[in-house]
Each structure stands twice: as structure tokens, then as C-alpha cells.
Image (cartoon, rainbow, N blue to C red):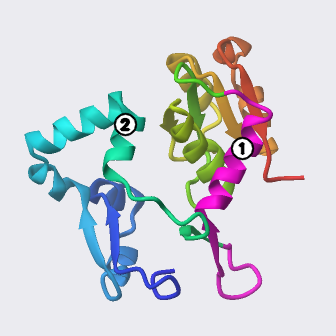
Amino acid sequence: ACETASIKVVYTSRKFIAEAGLEAEAAAIEEVATLVYLEDLRDDVSLKHKLRAAFAAYLPKLSYRLRQPQQNPQGDCVILFTSGSEGIPKGVVLTHANIIANRAQLQTLISLTHEDIVLNILPLFHAFGLLGGTLVPMLDGAKIVCYPSPLHYRIIPELSYQLGATILFGTNTFLAGYAKHGHPFDFHKMRFIVAGAEK
């Protein structure tokens, strides 16, 4: 992926690398790109950065207009890689227009608000998890909680209850597992459950 997409910098976390046992993969990435650990950036965050972030959080539209140049809608926004089941993984480029079109498509079915809490259990390297579970809610101002593994069938229903989650994106297989191991009240605040990425 780094070579195909000409990636020069990868942002990660030492804790993530350690907990996932990805030390060998991190070392391999360092041969072609620079690894930047988020723990190392913490000391570089100044009061100015924090104030700018607070301004952007409370006045996002004004903040965006003040600091962002116009983007080319056909410009590259995201590169997702296929699983490689047919050979070497292929990079699929999504443009800004692709993302906005997917957002508009979802908005015809679901109205997300700043009061929604989206529980995203899908991986961000998958189109459904990235677009449906992360980017669309982010663009619509909903809160997002990302959980690292969709396979924790007993934990996710309980997490849904604790968060008061209102929207959940998942595959049929994962949703069936939550239904089997969870209690109906775990999903008492759910407004929408979106199933996809499977037959």
C-alpha cells in the first residue's frame, strides 16, 4: 500500500502497535515510509492549537471557510485497498465527489443529527466502515465511537447500551451475533441499524 500509493508518512500509536502485535509490520513500513507516533505529538500541542481546535469544534462551518482553500471535487480524497484475493491488492481511489455523493445517498434514507451517537464496529479500511460509519456521521456532526473488533458479540451490545447509541452499521453476520448474545434493551435507543457488505 505504501509503495502503490507513494505514502511517505504513516501516523499510528505505540499502544496500538503493541496491543495488536504489529511490531514486525511497523518495522517493514519504516523501510519505505516515516512512522509518526501520536504519543510523540502530544508534547507539541500548544495552547494555540487547543484554542484553534475548540474554535473549529464549536463553529465548524466558519472555521472551515477561514482556513480551507476550495478542493477540486475530482481530486483524490481516499485510497482503499482491495483484499488481494485475486492477486496483489489494488488501490481504489475515491474522490471528494465520491464521498459527497455517498453522503447524499445515505441522507436520502437516514437523517443524522448532532444528537446521534454512531457506534462503528467496522474497520476503517473497508468502504462501509469508512464512509457509512465514520465520514458521513462526521460530516453531519454526529458523535462517533469506533470499536476495534466487530467480533466481540457480548461486549458490543453492552457498549451500545452504555453509550446510548442511536445508529449502528454492520454486516448481517455481525448483527446476528449481537442479536444472539445481547439483550433487546441493549439497543433501546437505536434509531437505525444499517446492514450491508454481505449478501
Label 1 CA crowd tier, 10 Å (few <14, some 14–19, many 20+)? few
> Which residue, given by chain and number where applicable, does mark 2 sit on?
62
Q: Is residue 77 left or right of residue 191?
A: left
The quarter of the displayed image where residue 132 is located: top right
Disc 1/disc 2 C-alpha distance (Å): 22 Å
Whether residue 57 is visible here, answered yes or no, is yes
> Which residue, given by chain and number where applicable, does mark 1 sit on?
104
Range covered by the magenta-colored residues: 82-111
- Across and down, in percent, residue 49 comes to 17, 44
Q: Is residue 163 above or below residue 33?
A: above
Q: Is residue 198 above or below residue 163?
A: below
Q: Is residue 115 left or right of residue 28?
A: right
Could you tell which of marks 1 and 2 lies nearer the N-terminus? 2
Q: Residue at x 41, y 80 (%)?
A: 7
Instruction: Please identify the residue farthest to the right as the structure is shown.
Output: 199
The quarter of the displayed image where residue 155 is located: top right
Q: Is residue 168 left or right of residue 135?
A: right
Whether residue 174 is visible here, answered yes or no, is no
Q: Residue at x 59, y 31 (%)?
A: 156
Q: Residue at x 83, y 53 (%)?
A: 198
The quarter of the displayed image where residue 48 is located: top left
- Across and down, in percent, residue 27 comes to 32, 80
Magenta segment includes 190 = no
The amino acid sitting under disc 2 is Leu
Q: Nearer the viewer, mark 1 or mark 2?
A: 2
- Judged from the image, the secondary structure of the residue bearing numbered disc 2 is helix
